[in-house]
Structure formats: C-alpha cells, structure tokens
Amino acid sequence: MKTEKTPLKLKDHSVSGDSFELIYDADRALLYTHPKPSESELSSYYSDTNYISHTNQRRSLFDMVYHVVRYVSVRRKLKLIKPFKSKQSTLLDVGAGTGFFIRTAQKKGWNVRGVEPNPSARRLANLKAPGSVFDTEALQQLSESSFDVITLWHVLEHLPNLEKDIKLFHKLLRPNGRIVVAVPNFNSFDANHFKAFWAAYDVPRHLWHFSQQSIPKVFSEVQMRVESTHPLVMDAYYVSLLSNKLKTGSHRFLSSLWTGFLSNLKAAKTGEYSSLIYVLKNKD
C-alpha cells in the first residue's frame, strides 16, 4: 500500500481536542485519519450531546436549518431509490440515526430494517418506526441476499472495518440490488477553501475521506461498480456553515452561503460537489 503524509493537521473540535493528521492512500485514492482510534475508544468521541444526527433537538436557528435540509434531502433520496423496488421492497439503512429516513421510507411502502450503534439515537428511531432499528451486531444475523437496497447516508466514513463491512453489505444484497452511499468529497471547492477547518473531515469520527476515484476502487473488491453519481447540493451550504463556526467561532451565514454557492457553481463544471451519492451495483 502506497501512502504519504499530507500537510493537513486536524483537531477534534467537538469532544476531545485531540490532534490528528490525514494520510493519503494512493492505492485506494482516499485519505485516512491517523492515529486511528481503537473500536473501544471510538464511542467516547461520540459523547457530545449536540451530535446532531443522534438527536431531534431544534434549539437554534442552525438546528432548524439542519432539519429543513434533512426533510428535503430524504424525499430526494427516496425518489432516487424508488426504481430499485421489488415485490418485497426490502431496505436496510445502515447508521439509521434517529430514524427519520426509515420512517419516511416505511410510509412509501418499503419493508425497512435499520442498524444504529448509538443507544440514544436508536431509542428515538424506534419511537418513529417501532421494532425496526437494531444495534449493529444484528447485521451478523441477517439472511444473505435479502435486501433490494442498502443505504449508507454519510456512514461509510465512520466504519472502523471498511473492507470487512463492505463485504458483509454485499453478501446481504440481492444479486440485482443496489448499495447507495453518500459521502463527503475532499476534492470539493469548500474542502480546499476551508482546509483543516473543513467540517466534513470531522476527525476522528470520520476515519476515511473519499474522492470520486475512491469509491470505485473500494467497491471493486466486491465486484461492484458505480452505476450513477448524484450531487448533494445543500451539503455545500451546510458544511460551510459548520466550517466557518470551527474557523471563526461564528456560522457567518452570508459568507457561508457565498462559499456554498461558489462550491456548487464550480462543481457544475467539474463534478466535484461537497458531497456525492453513489449508486453501486454488481458488475455485469
């Protein structure tokens, strides 16, 4: 494996204040967080009660923005996966958070199952979709070839055992099914603009950092290919708000909106959006 250090020295701004760096893995065209916390240590880095994907809070204007963006995004995601329904319409959502996506998918006729490692988020998810969301250990008990679609919405970057987990997801997928992955893109304009303060690095919770070249390489190990790619346009604005908060102590709404606009404008030509959705299927 060919690796090299990058100039980026990052800090965990949310919980610990610990320092990390990013290493470039040339074979897979991705960055990884170094040092990588052990699996037993990782849970402590999620202890911040304000970790927004694990709560339903609406205490600030920023929280309200997050929930509006999520509402719009979920409907777009469901439209994206609708063509992949079968008679069974089985869906596995990995990293279900508080269950908003799962509940909405149920209402659209999907037979859903979710996994979520955080107990508080899992409890909230099961209030929305009773009996649908389990601890990640439940993945090992699921039947092979049982899902039409497996979704990982900003989850792949969190997985400590990337190769092992991808192999498991592939085993759980029906032969003509799809794995749908949304991840930040470190080649985006906003990533280059904010550098070490780019919020989507979010070390050490984000262990892996992907480019458009990374995803085909990582999933080729299970003989899957990228069928289509879709931008998450709103992420450029949301991540810019978070990044400005890290850099300046303020969300700087106007400046963040401008940076997000520039990022999307440039990405319209380059394809390098702040975050991208990848639809993956088995190679023909």
Image: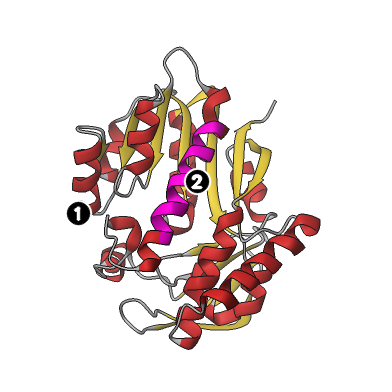
- In the picture, the disc for residue 12 is none
Q: Nearer the viewer, residue 100 or 175?
A: 100
In the depicted structure, whether residue 192 falls above or below residue 234: below
Q: Residues within 10 Å of mark 2 (few under 14, many from 20)?
A: some
In the depicted structure, whether residue 125 falls above or below residue 85: below
Classify residue 132 as left or right of residue 101.
left
**Considering the numbered disc 1 on the image, is that residue within a helix, a strand or a loop?**
helix
- In the picture, the disc for residue 120 is 1
Q: Amino acid at mark 2?
A: Ser
Outermost residue toward the bottom in this view: 248
Residue 28 figure quarter: bottom right
Identified at 44% across, 76% down, the residue is 35
Question: What residue would you read off at disc 2?
Answer: 73
Q: Nearer the viewer, residue 256 or 272?
A: 256
In the depicted structure, whether residue 211 falls above or below residue 145: below
Is residue 26 in sight in this rendering?
Answer: no
Residue 76 x %, y %:
53, 39
Quadrant location of the N terminus? bottom right
Q: Nearer the viewer, residue 74 or 35?
A: 74
In the depicted structure, whether residue 188 falls above or below residue 9: above
Q: Is residue 68 magenta?
A: yes
Residue 236 x %, y %:
59, 63
Identified at 26% across, 33% down, the residue is 132
Of callouts 1 and 2, which one flags the residue occurring earlier in the amino acid sequence?
Answer: 2
Quadrant location of the C terminus? top right
Q: Which residues are magenta?
A: 65-79
Mark 1 and mark 2 in contact? Answer it, CB < 8 Å. Answer: no
Outermost residue toward the top in this view: 87
Q: Main secondary structure of the magenta part?
A: helix
Q: Amino acid at mark 1?
A: Ser
**Considering the numbered disc 2 on the image, is that residue within a helix, a strand or a loop?**
helix
In this rendering, which labeled residue sits more in front, label 1 or label 2?
A: 2
